[in-house]
Amino acid sequence: MSKSSQAVFQFSTPEIAVERAVSELRYGRPVLLTEGSRTLATLALDCVAPSVYDQFAAATDARHSLLLTAPRASRLGLRATGDVLSPLTGVSFDQASRLAYSLGAEAPRSWQAADDLASLSAELARLALLLPAMVVADVSDAADLFAGCCTLSSAGLKGADVARQRFDQVVRTRVPLKDLGDADFVVFRGGLAQKDQVAIVVGKPDVTKTVPIRIHSSCITGDLCGSLKCDCGDQLRNGLSLLKHAGGGVLLYLDQEGRGTGIGAKMRAYGYQHLGLDTIDADAELGLRDDHRRYEAAVAMLQHLNIGRVAVYTNNPTKIEGLRLGGIEVEARAAVTGRVTAENENYLRTKTLRAGHMMDLASLVAAE
Ligand SMILES: Nc1nc2c(ncn2[C@@H]2O[C@H](COP(=O)(O)OP(=O)(O)OP(=O)(O)O)[C@@H](O)[C@H]2O)c(=O)[nH]1
Ligand SMILES: [Zn+2]
């Protein structure tokens, strides 16, 4: 075959660069973020080996800094209005890790507001389901030292948003469910990480009318293991049952463990909750916002199923906003609740008081 007739594989969409960078970070290797003539080298403290941290410090002549996101800066008592950078000159790996996410760490003596490119490195960590504790250094004049590293432009990172909406249906298969009869499990693949997401079609909903739906975020501890620390397991089963009794509907089971932060961060947060922090402060201590979930996958799945108008079972207003932003008409909302237990009461109260969840906790407690 002549060379000219050979097809050339070209893989250069923005999301591919993002996914490669995410993978590099998870392997504990540096990534270069570029914008114009600027190059920022960055490492995720959550998964880097101490020896690579030391190598990074040497390569940047110890001009490296730690990115502390706004929630972490606030927990450390810094009067900052956004993310900050704290210099790491002379700071060991263990000291940097303590400053980044340990409870009771002392505030850094010196810090400055972070620039946009440094803040963007935290976005990469979030995509990688790592704590947004990033070591960064401006290496615009020494990028050759990082020549073997994966490079990603800030425009590429921002541009990859289009990929979040792209999902393909992989398969649709019947599964008989206890007490519910047959359901169709429809698997979709796509988004930024090419994850598999599942829509569970209960009964035979009429998609030309308003379709009852539940959007459920995965919770390994609650859904699978019956953890008493949250109400997820009950909500999952009650949600499916509500859909059946509504004459059929769809439960979108989203791969969004720990409000989109991943099981690692969620378990670290549980450690802080055992020491007395509520669910939001525990996440902030780790540099995380109240909620990192996005709903493009939910919108895309509904569109594939030809569903444009829904009635949603949720107590969470941001789920409704996410659907509306994606062009889905939300005609109604109804509550879906679980049992209140001694272990989850504070969690539910925090969601109601601090995260705007529409839940009548007093009535739920009285009903127990
Ligand atoms: N970070 C964090 N995530 C948690 C904690 N407890 C539960 N989760 C996660 O929170 C999410 C709860 O999902 P859902 O029940 O679908 O969502 P919700 O925001 O409670 O809203 P509705 O149930 O629809 O009212 C899941 O991703 C859980 O894994 C916690 O203490 N910290
Ligand atoms: Zn849960």
Image (spheres, rainbow, N blue to C red):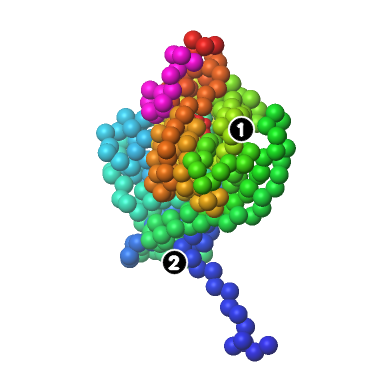
Q: Looking at the image, is mark 2 or mark 1 nearer the viewer?
A: 1
Query: Percent position (x, y) of residue 264?
Result: 56, 37
Q: Which residues are magenta?
A: 352-364
Query: Percent position (x, y) of residue 180?
Result: 68, 32
Q: Check disc 2 and give the amino acid type.
A: Asp
| Magenta highlight on residue 360 | yes
Query: Percent position (x, y) of residue 38?
Result: 34, 62
User: Quadrant of residue 354 in the image?
Assistant: top left
In the rendered view, tell whether residue 39 sits above or below residue 52: below
In the rendered view, tell whether residue 178 sits above or below residue 326: above
Question: How far apart in space, not on screen, are marks 2 and 1 (Cα)?
Answer: 60 Å
Residue nearest the observer in this picture, 197 or 246: 246
Q: Quadrant of the C terminus?
A: top right
Q: Check disc 1 and give the amino acid type.
A: Lys
Residue nearest the observer in this picture, 269 or 178: 178
Q: Is residue 187 left or right of residue 324?
A: right
Q: Residue at x 62, y 83 (%)?
A: 6
- Residue 258 visible, this orientation: no
Disc 1, SS: helix
Disc 2, SS: helix
Query: Percent position (x, y) of residue 258?
Result: 52, 35
Q: Is residue 48 left or right of residue 120?
A: right
Q: Residue at x 50, y 32 (%)?
A: 313
Residue carrying label 2: 144
The reply to whether the residue tagged 1 has its Cβ within 8 angstroms of ligand 1 is no
Q: Label 2 crowding class (10 Å Cα cut-off): few <14, some 14-19, many 20+?
A: few
User: Quadrant of residue 315 in the image?
Assistant: top left
Q: Label 1 crowding class (10 Å Cα cut-off): few <14, some 14-19, many 20+?
A: many
Q: Quadrant of the N terminus?
A: bottom right
Residue carrying label 1: 244
